[in-house]
Amino acid sequence: MEMEKLDAETEFLATKQETGNEWELKLIEAIDEYKGDDPLFPWIQCIKWVQEAFPPGGDCSGLILIYEQCVRAFWHSDRYKDDLRYLKVWLEYAENCVDAEVIYNFLDANEIGKSHSAYYLAYALHMESKSKMKIANDIFNLGISRDAQPIEKLKDAYRKFFIRSIRKPNVVEDDYGESHLPVRSFGTVLSSADNRRQNMERSELANKQMKPDRTPKIPLSVFKDTANIDTMPGHQSGKSKTDLNPWSSLGAREERNKENSAMPTKWTTYKIPHRPGGVTASASIEVFVDEECTEMDNGSHDHDGKSSKLKLRQGDGQDIKKETDLLRQNPLRNFPLRSLPR
């Protein structure tokens, strides 16, 4: 009985998974075949269905891949830059990545979602989780200065953040401050009075060391080698000044400037021979084109939000899990280079 019950449960789960895959494939086909005025709508429907069908998530659900292909389909569209639905897809995608700061920098560089407070709130809280309090404070102030809506929600979150930042000890700044204080030989920090007294003692010691010794000193004797003075280079004792300087007359200016006096002529006596079988002028170098990069770049600019590369279920679960892990580590790996922040 237990064996039959186990087989019945396994069969039910397999049937449910197969049915789920069929529904997901239908939703994916609906994205490619959509003809309406809002191409983002079928993407939102597909994301909602996957979230409800796989509540715990999981790498094999394909949700990360759907996030990535959805945001990549519309990043260059001005129509969806301020669309809150599109921004929420980006934020949900960022929550599933190892370092969401890459995504927030991308949104800032491409001006996506800058009129919504949800962007600044998520960005600031992420930087606070990394203990970058000053950057988080600047992000809150930037959102408030841009009057991001709803502004009251952003201001309320900023007040709570400000209270947390005051109570949170700033370890980095404390360590930095102590490193610049004078330290004794045994490691205790000096007070200001001890510091001044120590500096005065050091200056008095330095003045004593710099005082010149007034005791008479014996002059140094300079050694002269009289035996080898005639054999030294450049020393010619037997020659007069006239012999040492034979150029009594420098000559005229034309005689001194006699370099390059020959007139240039044409090279008519020698011809460079041509090599047999040499490269002709019509020949050209073949440029290598990476087909995978070309297809990737073309796929990221599909019009009307249609993705011809959406093939989540054509591979097995291992392929989806591998691609999911790669996107978690590098969420912008499939984006064109010109779209990335510099």
Image (tube, rainbow, N blue to C red):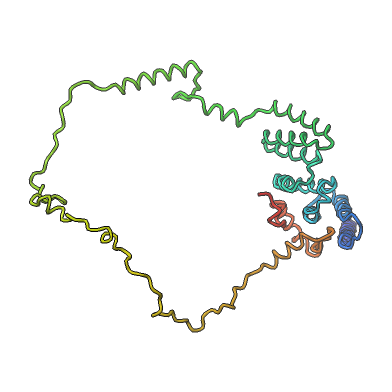
Taking the image as drawn, is residue 60 in sight?
Answer: no
Q: Is residue 181 above or below residue 151?
A: above
Q: In the image, is 39 to the left or to the right of 194?
A: right
Q: Is residue 142 above or below residue 106?
A: above
Residue most toward the bottom? Answer: 276
Q: How many marks?
A: 0
Taking the image as drawn, is residue 85 in sight?
Answer: yes
Q: In the image, is 194 to the left or to the right of 329?
A: left
Residue most toward the right? Answer: 36
Going 77% across and 34% down the picture, which residue do you hit?
Answer: 144
Q: In the image, is 165 to the left or to the right of 11?
A: left
> Residue 183 location in percent, x, y?
48, 24
Going 14% across and 36% down the picture, which residue do you hit?
Answer: 222
Q: In the image, is 47 to the left or to the right of 209?
A: right
> Residue 236 location in percent, x, y?
11, 51
> Residue 264 location in percent, x, y?
37, 70
> Residue 176 location in percent, x, y?
56, 30
Going 83% across and 58% down the picture, which residue do you hit?
Answer: 305
* Quadrant of the drawing holding the N terminus: bottom right
Compare residues 274 and 333 and report the one nearer the observer: 274
Among the 4 quarters of the image, the one containing residue 214: top left
